[in-house]
Image (cartoon, grey):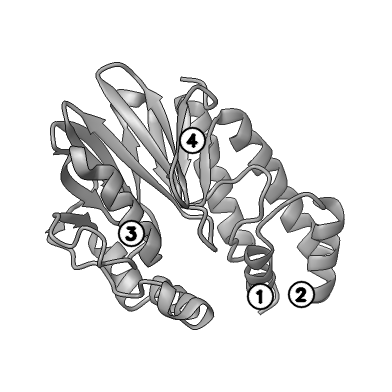
Amino acid sequence: MNKNTFKTVKLEKGEMNIYDFGTIKLHAYKTNDFIDDEVFIIEKNGKAVIIESPCFFDNNRELTNYLNNMNVEGMLIAYHGAGATFLSEVSKYSTQNAIDYSQNGGGKTLIGNFTNAFGKIFDSSIHKITNIINEGKINIGGIDFVIKQTSEAFDVEIPEINAVYTHMLGHDCHSIVAGAGHADAIIAELKNYIEKGYDLILTSHYTPEDLKDAKTKIDYLENLKAIAANCSDADSFKEEVQKQYPEYSGQNYLDMTAGFFFA
């Protein structure tokens, strides 16, 4: 499936890009919120499984309305634990480390930061997980998923559409990179995606991407490490990255990356 082969449905705030695989569809919800969230719905035989959750109240309402004609069988909550007013009655699936990330770890810190930044429009409530899952194959609503635990949460392989979901990619935007070691871990994972030959890479903050985008991101991460090695502080690091990547979005993520490299 080509990443640009989709039908777009414009919503009041966001938009839905629909990829039709025949017996199964991927609905990629572009929220157009302040942190560029993306939510994914896998639909098969009238049943749907959602990957991640929106976290702004207006997006919660908009996506709920869109899902009116689907039977939502469950939600996979990985890196985005906030937004618990969204489909609160639906079963929520997560690994224990992802629960810890949202309730006590880095995810909780991010939720706190976003709450302070956006105030009452941000749904800071954390999803209550009903089903704790482990690595390996799981079937929800007649759809197979393969769970792979990561250091913070988990990634999701979707074999029927030859796709994988992870937290971040973004071939022309900055990402949160927690130092050189983290960059190396991301590079290794992206090389694994290329080796496996996925058609689509789904991420929380970008529209679906492909293996060409993964290669672009690897080059960016290698260069990011080199820039950091030749800079003495966060400001000079950010200045040089912006000089080399003037068209990249995600300035807030670059600020966070600089903080990690020059703590």
Task: Bin the neighbour count of mark 2 within 10 Å (Cα to Cα): few under 14, some 14-19, many 20 and up.
Answer: some
Select label 3 or label 4 by which is in front: 3
C-alpha gap between disc 3 and disc 4: 34 Å
Judging by the rendered image, the residue that carries numbered circle 3 is: 60
**Three-letter code for the amino acid on which mark 2 is drawn:** Ala
Judging by the rendered image, the residue that carries numbered circle 2 is: 234
In the image: residue 129, left or right of residue 5: left
Judging by the rendered image, the residue that carries numbered circle 1 is: 259
**Three-letter code for the amino acid on which mark 4 is drawn:** Asn
Select label 4 or label 1 by which is in front: 1
Image coordinates for residue 109, horizontal then vertical, percent: 44, 78
**Whether label 1 touches label 3, CB < 8 Å:** no
In the image: residue 71, left or right of residue 83: left
What is the quadrant of residue 106 in the picture? bottom left
Query: Looking at the image, can residue 55 be seen?
Result: no
Tell me if residue 172 comes above or below residue 19 in the rendering: below
Secondary structure found at label 4: helix
What is the quadrant of residue 43 in the picture? top left
**Whether label 1 touches label 2, CB < 8 Å:** yes
Judging by the rendered image, the residue that carries numbered circle 4 is: 192
In the image: residue 67, left or right of residue 53: left
Q: Earlier in the sequence, mark 1 or mark 3?
A: 3
Select label 1 or label 3 by which is in front: 3
